[in-house]
Image: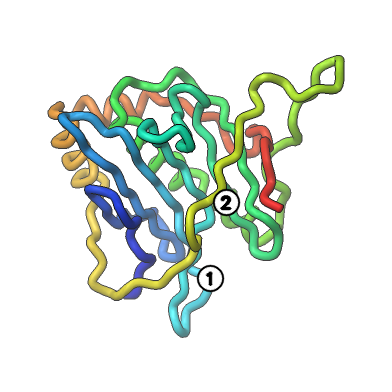
Amino acid sequence: MSAPSLPIGYDVSKHVPAGRRDCLLTVGFDQHQQHIPRFLVQLHYRVAIDPIEWTAIARMDHNETSSLGHDVYREGLHVDVARRSQPTVHLQLAHAPLPISRGAVIRGCANYLKREAEYFIDVFEERRSPGRPPSWSDGGEPTPTFIPSHRVEGDMSREAPADADMVSDEELTELLADAEGTAPETIERGAAELEIAPPEEATVVDVDE
């Protein structure tokens, strides 16, 4: 089966099943001395069958190595959501405090995109509006929770050969645990404890022009 292209430029890049035939996850992360400074988790949606074509419809990322990167520990979790005929929209998510383990955050993000796949498909197909509008203070100015936008890098849709590098949830956990020098159980526990509000409760913080 054809699969979406893997994230480019990461130390580790894998495909992960999304629990439904029309979706697939890609995960990429860097590792440096038992630390993960950068990662990308994307939900891909199969938009055509003959030939098979995939589009990344939701993206969550973290990058503490660049001043232009999105650091989730300073700015919170966000998700970039693609739409079929309208600009990409950027949603700020409400969530519990993030675990120190970046591996646990990656697993939490992967679980979140799987769980909310139907929502992101509906937004992509423009069957529903994303999130909610920004909050405004009494003075008519944006609240301090408004985050800067970092445009999605490169094409959100590319096709890859059928011999994609696929791992299960358990295998992804083992890779993350190995990268951080910790136990798989620690990754799984941190991911399970990471509570993220549904995307329909998220705040729209930016829309690509």
Residue 184 drawn at (x, y percent) = 17, 32
Picture layout, residue 122 above or below residue 3: above
10 Å neighbourhood of mark 1: few (<14), some, or many (≥20)?
some
**Residue that lies at the very extreme toward the top in this rendered image:** 138
Q: Nearer the viewer, residue 1 or 148?
A: 148
Q: Earlier in the sequence, mark 1 or mark 2?
A: 1
Asked which secondary structure carries label 2, the reply is: helix
- Name the residue at 63% across, 33% down: 202
**Residue that lies at the very extreme toward the bottom in this rendered image:** 50
Colouring of the image: rainbow
Q: From mark 1 to mark 2, how far is it between C-alphas?
A: 13 Å
17 sits left or right of 171 in the view: right
Q: Amino acid at mark 2?
A: Phe
Q: Nearer the viewer, residue 140 or 160?
A: 140
The residue tagged 2 is: 120
Labels in figure, total: 2
Q: Amino acid at mark 1?
A: Val
The residue tagged 1 is: 47
157 sits left or right of 83 in the view: left
Residue 57 drawn at (x, y percent) = 53, 56
On the image, which quarter does residue 110 sit in? top left
Q: Nearer the viewer, residue 80 or 167?
A: 80
- Name the residue at 45% across, 40% down: 112
Asked which secondary structure carries label 1, the reply is: strand
Residue 188 drawn at (x, y percent) = 26, 31
The label number, if any, that marks residue 63 in the structure image:
none
Circles 1, 2 touching at the beta carbon (< 8 Å): no
